[in-house]
Image: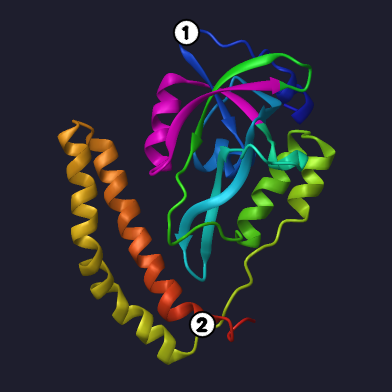
Amino acid sequence: MSHRAFLARASVSDANTVRYFAYGSNLDRGTFEGTRAMKPRASTPCVLPGYQLAFNVPGLPYVEPSFASVRVAPADAVERFERECHGVAHEITEAEWARLVATEGSYDVVDVDCVGYDGAVLKCRTLTHRTMKNFGERAPSARYANLLRNGSRFHGLDAEWIEYLDALEVFEPVDLDPMQRVALAMSVGPTLLAAAPIATAAAGKQIANGDGRRAVIDAFLETQDVAWRVQNEFFEPWIKGNRK
């Protein structure tokens, strides 16, 4: 099927399907239909007003430092793409949606109103992520940024949006010396020990509320936040001098 026919299929949801607004790597057909094994009934280009694209999802230092999310635009946002995020409304089954949420890990689910390029309002669900204190927001890898760029082109998203993605700053790889690699490896155990009380406390609050999934997510995020604090305070000064 050509990509034009793929985009033109009917996009009206029924009781057994979900419209999922994708803005990150799930724009890429190879990722969404290949790696994730999703089979969307329709994929409709659209815009999410009042939200902005953010790279505030913690990844792996030196490899994939960040992943994409969307967050509510601040009231004082001025620039166009500080106030809207472009993407695709994939229509998938409830079972596919449940699998997607489970595999996306630490994201939260929100209901949003997207607007198709034809002006139609599309009731969607999407995934957003809290911004962690010690992580903030960081440039994505070139590999990850290219998934967004290529997916946006495939789905025919707004030309100015594609220009915006093309201009994104990307992570510059670093080449750590052997001693730095050893120091990083030795830091893992103490970091996990330091994070354990914080992660346990965070999980305990959610367990008390009867939310097991949120307990796991909160424990994971608190552990990541401690790990990035160690990264910021001890290793960030090193890698600035090790750019390739």
Disc 2 residue type? Pro
Comparing labels 2 and 1, the label whose residue is closer to the camera: 2
Work out which residue is located at the far front of the displayed protein and give it. Answer: 76
Residue 45 location (% of width, % of height):
71, 27
Report the disc number at residue 83.
Answer: none
Report the disc number at residue 15.
Answer: 1
**Pointer 1 local density, CA inside 10 Å: few below 14, some 14–19, many at least 20:** few
Label 2 element class: helix
Against 10, is 233 above or below? below
The answer to whether any part of residue 175 appears in the image is yes
Residue 12 location (% of width, % of height):
62, 10
Residue 134 location (% of width, % of height):
43, 62
Q: Magenta span covers which residues?
A: 88-115
Label 1 element class: loop
Mark count: 2
| Residue identified by numbered label 2 | 237
Of labels 2 and 1, earlier in sequence is 1
Against 49, is 65 above or below? below
Residue in the foreground of this view, choosing between 1 and 126 = 126
Whole-angstrom CA distance, mark 2 to mark 1, is 53 Å
Residue 126 location (% of width, % of height):
52, 30
Asked whether, in this view, residue 221 is left or right of residue 216, the answer is right
Against 63, is 26 above or below? above
Question: Which image quadrant for residue 133?
Answer: bottom left
Asked whether, in this view, residue 161 is left or right of residue 125, the answer is right
Question: Which image quadrant for residue 158?
Answer: top right
The answer to whether any part of residue 37 appears in the image is no
- Residue found 45% across the figure and 79% down from its top: 235
